[in-house]
Image (cartoon, grey):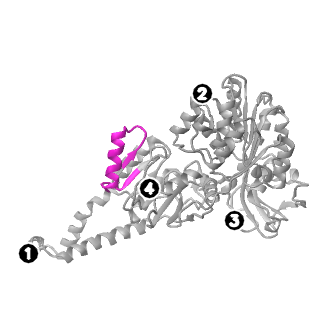
Amino acid sequence: MTTTFQALGLHPQLVQAVSELGFVTPTPIQSATIPLLLNGRDVLGQAQTGTGKTAAFALPMLHAIEPRSAGVQGLVVAPTRELANQVATAIYSYGQYRHVRVLPIYGGQSYARQISRLERGVDIVVGTPGRMLDLIRKHVLDLSNVRYLVLDEADEMLSMGFVEDIETILQEIPAARQSALFSATLSGAVRALADRYMATPESITINPENLTLSSTEQRCYVVRSSDKLAAVSRLLEMEKVTSALIFTRTRVSTAELAEALSVRGFQSEALHGDLGQDAREAVLGRFRRQRFTCLVATDVAARGLDIDDVTHVINYDLPLDPEYYVHRIGRTGRAGKEGTAISLVTPKEMWRLSRIEKYTRSPILRAELPSKDQVLKHRDDCFVGELQNELGKGKLEHERDLVSQLIESGCDPLDVAAAAIQLARMGEGDRLLEDIVDVSKPAKRNGRHTKSYAGNKGRNTSSRGKRSHEPDMVRLSMNLGKSQQLHPGEIVGAIAGTARVPGQAIGAIRIGKHETFVDVTEKHADRVLQRMRGWKVRGNAVVLRRAD
């Protein structure tokens, strides 16, 4: 098994980029796949998200193309806008020193902006099938020069009903191309697609084991991005934190968060790429000696970090790659000690959390943040405990004399004690306790509920009843359910793809044993009912109608 990226034979600029991103040794899927792709072979890969498959197909693509020379040379087709954006960001990072032009295209973005970028010239396009087809039909996405094709998470795309769109796209690409197909499962439909459109591909299978530590408690809290600071402040106050490693996504946010936490009374320092080696070692030395509680860092800054006795790892920002999640939380719960891994997740990131759970094969507990009343009671309990500790020590003669003087001057003993407590606790004012919006409930704006759409992976499936609880939404019913192995992604993909309605038009989904309810916007309901006539799921005819 190859142990370095340089030994794989990649372009030196690519090796430099991945090294600076913190990649030390290739993952199994990278070691197995990259040499084959560099040799011009087609690859059919079975691998979960988080095994490093993006780099496995992106690095050979970046090695093979000639930047800024011949239009779109690389094409990556992905099932969701989130994945397309994530893959495009990764490819741009890997190819930064080759000056590669990468464009993500997906629904919900301005056509004008995407068309303008395509007209100026793009080397690699990463996108979802629907928007790709739209741009092909508008004659602005030209795939006649594509040399390298990737179908990412093919099983997801097929289950979402994109097979015809994919085949139409493939017909626009020259037959003399190199292809890579990656899928978590190699179903009959996936293999049939590979047989039709790939040239005797090499098969690679990677099956990761459970990757997280049993000694680490994993919890997550769903909050708005704007409430993250308030949320982490409550948690740091309520948890028994000796030393916490807090991860953010950018070097700028590490310094900002460390400063904000310090102002609130939580001793914090930042570890980022702008620090020289001496400064970095000084910060780590202070953290090891527990001179401060919270070390705020990025993944790159924390690479190679080996510190014992970290009680908490906090994902202030979720990592883009599930593999990084494993690396992060592996820094707590060491040497037989218990550790805690906490993640702050925005509603739009629930799909990413699901990918992490799928990759690690380990559930992450959805927990509720401590309430204001709970935090205030905790403060009272801590103060009373400290006070009782001082009382138990004795040696209060001087203080008793002061109390006696105040009583003799006419002060009430209870008032004296209350005033002393107030003075002693004045510093607690620095620990702000803001309101935090409960994102499990619909937000209100000007007296009206604001709609919230969670995306394909995080879509609400718990809404009950035959009528939609959301304004301007209509509940539809269909005659299939769990007995037919129906799942939300399949429903969303079929409706969005067949009825040609935006994903935002689809709301709550509840799948029962033999019946399913799905909410769509009122203005799209008739279109969905008309276009979905004749829809079949694994040979079963679907009857779709308005729920009573």
- Which residue is at a point 35% across and 45% down the rendered structure image? 281
**Which residue is the site of mark 2?**
99
Q: Nearer the viewer, residue 535 or 151?
A: 151
Pointer 3 residue = 463
Q: Earlier in the sequence, mark 1 or mark 4?
A: 4
Span of residues in magenta: 269-295
Q: Is residue 129 above or below residue 138?
A: below
- The amino acid type found where label 2 is placed reads His
Q: Is residue 348 magenta?
A: no
Q: Secondary structure at mark 3?
A: loop
How far apart are labels 3 and 4 at the CA level? 29 Å
Residue located beneath label 1 in the image = 408
Which badge, 2 or 1, comes first in the chain's sequence? Answer: 2
User: Circle 3: is it few (<14), some (14-19), or many (20+) Cα within 10 Å?
Assistant: some
Q: Amino acid at mark 3?
A: Ser
In the image, what residue type sits under mark 1?
Glu
**2 vs 1, front mark:** 2
> Please, what secondary structure does the residue beneath circle 1 have?
helix
Q: Taking the image as drawn, is residue 293 in sight?
A: yes
Cα separation, mark 2 vs mark 4, equals: 40 Å
Q: CA distance from mark 1 to mark 4?
A: 45 Å
If you read the primary sequence from the N terminus, does the residue marked by circle 3 or circle 4 appear first? 4
Where is residue 142 drawn, in percent x and y? 78, 28
- In the figure, is residue 218 to the left or right of 30? left
Residue 230, numbered circle: 4
Residue 289: in magenta span? yes
At label 4, the amino acid type is Ala
Nearest the viewer among 545 and 86 is 86
Residue 324 location in percent, x, y?
Answer: 55, 50
